[in-house]
C-alpha cells in the first residue's frame, strides 16, 4: 500500500498550492483529482475561462466604443465566437498543464479518481475505470471546493438554463439573457454576453447589487453598468421558468411577494451563489462534522474534529475566492511542517473583473458603522486623475477608510479601470498595519492610475491636491 505524509483531495487553487508547498517543505505528497485536468473550478470552469472571455469581449467592444475616439478606425467588428472560445480554451489548457508540470517538478504523485476518506490516515481512490485502491497517509487535506447553488423551478440543463459552466460555452450570443443574481458571476458573465450583443436583465433578490461590497461602491457600479445597457430588477425573485416554448418565460415576483410578471429570455443564467462540495467523500462515516451550511467545520488551524483530517478553500467557511483557498493551502502545509502557517482574513482582496473593475480589501463603511468604529473617509474620483483623463476611462473612484484616531487603514474600495491591480498597494499597507498618512507620503509615479490611491489617502486628511 502506497504511503504518504500528506494526501490532498482536490486540485483546485487550495489543493494544488497546498500540495506544492508541502512538497517544498520535504513531505511525500499525493493528490487525488476526479476531473480529467488539474486546477479545479478556478482553472477549468471559473476564474480562468471567465477572465479569457472578459478580456476578449472587452477588446471586441473597444473597437466600436473606444478606438474610433483615438483615431483608430478598423470598421465594424465581426464576432467569431468559435475562435473566441478557442482563445479561452487555449488559456485554460496552458494553466491546467502548468499545474501538471508543477506536480511533476515537485515529485507529487497524482491519482485520477474520486477520493473517499475511510478514516484518519486512510483514503480510498476509485479510478474512472471503477477500480479502487487504498492509500495510507499521516495527514489528509480536504480541498474539494464548491458547486453551483440550485433554485427550485429553475432546472439547469446547461443549454438554455445555464450555470456559470454553461454560460462559458454558449454556442451563440443569446438575443435576451436573463441573469438571476446580481453577484460576481452574474455581473461578470452578464457583461461578457452584453458586450457581444445580448440584451441583459439581472434579477436580484435584495434591493442592491453585490451584497457584502461597500454600499456606495455598489450603487456607483450599478449606475455604470446601467449606462452600459444592463437592466436591473432589484428586490425581485424568479419563481419559475417555463421552458415549453421556443422562448423561455421566467416568472418574476417582488421579493416580498405580489403580482408576478413574465420576462422572456433565450438563455437564463442562474448565479445565486455556490455551495460547499462534499459528495462521495465519506465524511459522515469518517465522523467529520459539517456546519449548518454544509461546510466542513474546522478550528482556527484548518483541523476538522477528526485528528489528522484538515480542510481548506471553498469547502470551509469564508469568502469563496481562489486566493483565499491558496493562502489557506500554504498555511496548512506550513502548520503540518511545524511552522506557524497563518491566513489573515482581514486582508483578502476581492475583484470583479468587469469594465471598469471593482476591487475591495478590508472593511466596508457599513461594517465599520456596525462595529461602532469611528473612521475618516478619503475619496478621489478618477475624473481628476491625469492618466484616466487622458485615456478617457474616468468612471469610478478610490475610497479609503481609516481610523478616526490612529489613521490606520481599515479598508480600500475602488471602482475603475485596472482597480484589480491597484488594490494590492492598499493590501500590503494593511498587512503592515499602515496608516493613510503612510500611503499619502509614498511617492507614486506620474502619470499612473495609482496616483488616485495616493490622492484618496491625502483626502483622508482633507488635503488632496487635484480636487
Ligand atoms: P475548487 O477549485 O472547486 O477545486 C476542487 C476540486 O476538487 C475540483 O477539481 C473537484 O473535481 C475536486 N474534487 C471534489 N471532490 C473530489 C473527490 N471526492 N475526489 C477527488 N477530487 C474531488 N475566484 C477568484 O478568486 N477570482 C475569480 O476571478 C474567480 N472567478 C470565478 C468564476 C466562476 C465562473 C466561478 C464559478 C468561480 C470563480 N471564482 C473566482 C471562485 C474560485 O473558482 C473558487 O473560490 C476556487 O476555485 C476554490 O478553490 P478550491 O481549491 O477550494 O476548490
Ligand atoms: P454571489 O454570492 O456573489 O451572488 C449571488 C447573488 O444572488 C447575491 O446578490 C444574492 O443576493 C442573489 N440571490 C440569491 N438568491 C437569489 C434568488 N432566489 N433570486 C435572485 N437573486 C438571488 O454568488 P455568485 O455570483 O453565484 O458567485 C459564487 C461565488 O463565486 C462567489 O462567492 C464569488 O466569490 C465567487 N466568484 C468570484 C469571482 C471573482 O472573484 N472575480 C468571479 C466569480 C465568482
Image: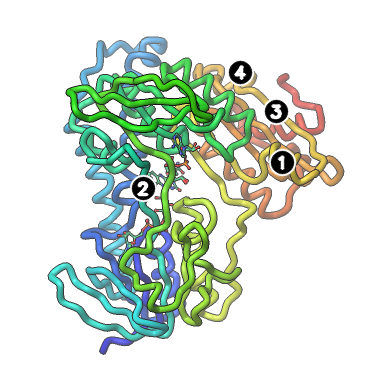
Label disc, if present, on residue 439 of the rendered structure: 1
Say which quarter of the image contains residue 196: top left
Q: CA distance from mark 4 to mark 3?
A: 12 Å
- Secondary structure at badge 1 equals helix
Q: CA distance from mark 2 to mark 1?
A: 40 Å
The picture quadrant for ligand 1 comes to bottom left
* Circle 4 or circle 1, nearest the eye: 4
Q: Residue furthest right?
A: 405
For label 4, being within 8 Å of ligand 2 is answered: no
Front: mark 3 or 1? 3
The answer for how far apart the CA atoms under marks 4 and 1 are is 21 Å
Q: Cα distance, mark 2 to mark 3?
A: 36 Å
Q: Nearer the viewer, mark 4 or mark 3?
A: 3
Q: CA distance from mark 4 to mark 2?
A: 39 Å
Label 4: which secondary element = helix
In this view, the residue farthest toward the left is 129
Nearest to N terminus: mark 2 or mark 1: 2
Secondary structure found at label 2? strand
N-terminal of the pair, mark 3 or mark 1, is: 3
Report if the CB atoms under discs 4 and 2 are less than 8 Å apart: no
Using the image, tell me which numbered label, if any, was put on residue 383.
4
Residue 126 in the figure: left or right of residue 447? left
173 vs 343: above or below: above
Q: Which part of the image, by quadrant, shows the N terminus? A: bottom left
- For disc 3, the marked residue is 379
Q: Which residue is mark 2?
A: 148
SS label for mark 3: strand
Asked whether the beta carbons under mark 3 and mark 1 sit within 8 Å of each other, the answer is no
* In this view, 395 is above or below 76: below
Residue at horizontal 30%, vertical 30%?
241
Q: Are marks 4 and 1 in contact (CB under 8 Å)?
A: no
Amino acid at each position: 500500500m502506497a504511503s504518504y505524509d500528506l494526501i490532498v483531495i482536490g486540485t483546485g487553487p487550495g489543493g494544488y498550492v497546498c500540495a506544492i508547498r508541502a512538497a517544498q517543505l520535504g513531505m511525500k505528497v499525493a493528490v487525488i483529482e476526479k476531473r480529467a485536468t488539474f486546477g479545479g473550478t478556478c482553472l477549468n470552469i471559473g476564474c480562468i475561462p471567465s477572465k479569457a472571455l472578459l478580456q476578449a469581449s472587452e477588446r471586441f467592444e473597444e473597437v466600436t466604443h473606444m478606438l474610433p475616439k483615438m483615431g483608430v478606425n478598423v470598421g465594424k467588428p465581426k464576432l467569431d465566437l468559435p475562435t473566441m472560445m478557442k482563445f479561452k480554451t487555449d488559456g485554460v489548457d496552458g494553466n491546467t498543464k502548468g499545474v501538471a508540470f508543477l506536480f511533476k517538478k515537485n515529485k507529487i504523485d497524482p491519482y485520477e479518481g474520486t477520493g473517499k476518506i475511510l478514516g484518519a490516515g486512510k483514503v480510498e481512490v476509485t479510478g474512472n475505470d471503477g477500480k479502487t485502491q487504498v492509500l495510507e497517509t499521516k495527514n489528509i487535506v480536504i480541498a474539494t471546493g464548491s458547486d453551483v447553488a440550485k433554485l427550485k423551478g429553475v432546472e439547469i440543463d446547461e443549454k438554455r438554463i445555464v450555470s456559470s459552466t454553461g454560460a462559458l460555452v454558449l454556442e451563440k450570443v443569446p438575443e435576451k439573457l436573463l441573469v438571476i443574481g446580481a453577484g460576481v458571476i452574474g455581473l461578470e458573465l452578464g457583461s461578457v454576453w452584453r458586450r457581444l450583443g445580448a440584451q441583459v436583465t439581472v434579477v436580484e433578490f435584495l434591493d442592491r447589487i453585490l451584497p457584502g461590497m461597500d454600499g456606495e461602491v455598489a450603487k456607483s457600479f450599478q449606475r455604470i453598468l446601467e449606462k452600459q445597457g444592463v437592466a436591473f430588477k432589484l428586490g425581485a425573485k424568479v419563481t419559475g421558468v417555463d421552458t415549453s416554448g421556443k422562448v423561455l418565460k421566467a416568472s418574476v415576483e417582488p421579493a416580498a411577494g405580489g403580482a408576478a410578471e413574465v420576462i422572456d429570455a433565450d438563455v437564463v443564467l442562474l448565479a445565486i451563489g455556490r455551495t460547499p462540495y462534499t459528495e462521495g467523500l465519506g465524511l459522515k462515516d469518517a465522523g467529520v462534522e459539517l456546519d449548518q451550511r454544509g461546510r466542513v467545520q474546522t478550528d482556527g488551524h484548518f483541523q476538522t474534529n477528526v485528528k489528522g483530517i484538515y480542510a481548506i478553500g471553498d469547502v470551509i467557511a469564508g469568502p469563496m475566492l481562489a486566493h483565499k483557498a491558496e493562502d489557506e493551502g500554504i498555511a496548512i502545509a506550513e502548520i503540518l511542517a511545524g511552522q506557524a502557517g497563518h491566513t489573515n482574513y482581514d486582508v483578502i482582496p476581492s475583484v470583479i473583473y468587469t469594465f471598469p473593475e471593482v476591487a475591495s480589501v478590508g472593511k466596508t463603511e457599513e461594517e465599520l458603522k456596525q462595529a461602532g468604529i469611528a473612521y475618516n473617509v478619503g475619496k478621489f474620483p478618477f475624473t481628476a486623475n491625469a492618466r484616466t483623463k487622458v485615456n478617457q476611462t474616468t468612471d469610478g473612484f478610490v475610497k479609503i477608510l481609516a481610523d478616526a484616531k490612529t489613521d490606520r487603514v481599515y479598508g480600500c474600495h475602488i471602482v475603475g479601470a485596472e482597480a484589480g491591480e491597484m488594490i494590492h498597494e492598499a493590501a500590503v499597507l494593511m498587512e503592515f498595519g499602515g496608516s493613510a498618512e503612510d500611503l499619502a507620503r509614498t511617492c507614486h509615479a506620474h502619470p499612473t492610475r495609482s496616483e488616485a490611491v495616493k490622492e484618496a489617502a491625502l483626502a483622508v486628511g482633507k488635503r488632496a491636491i487635484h480636487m
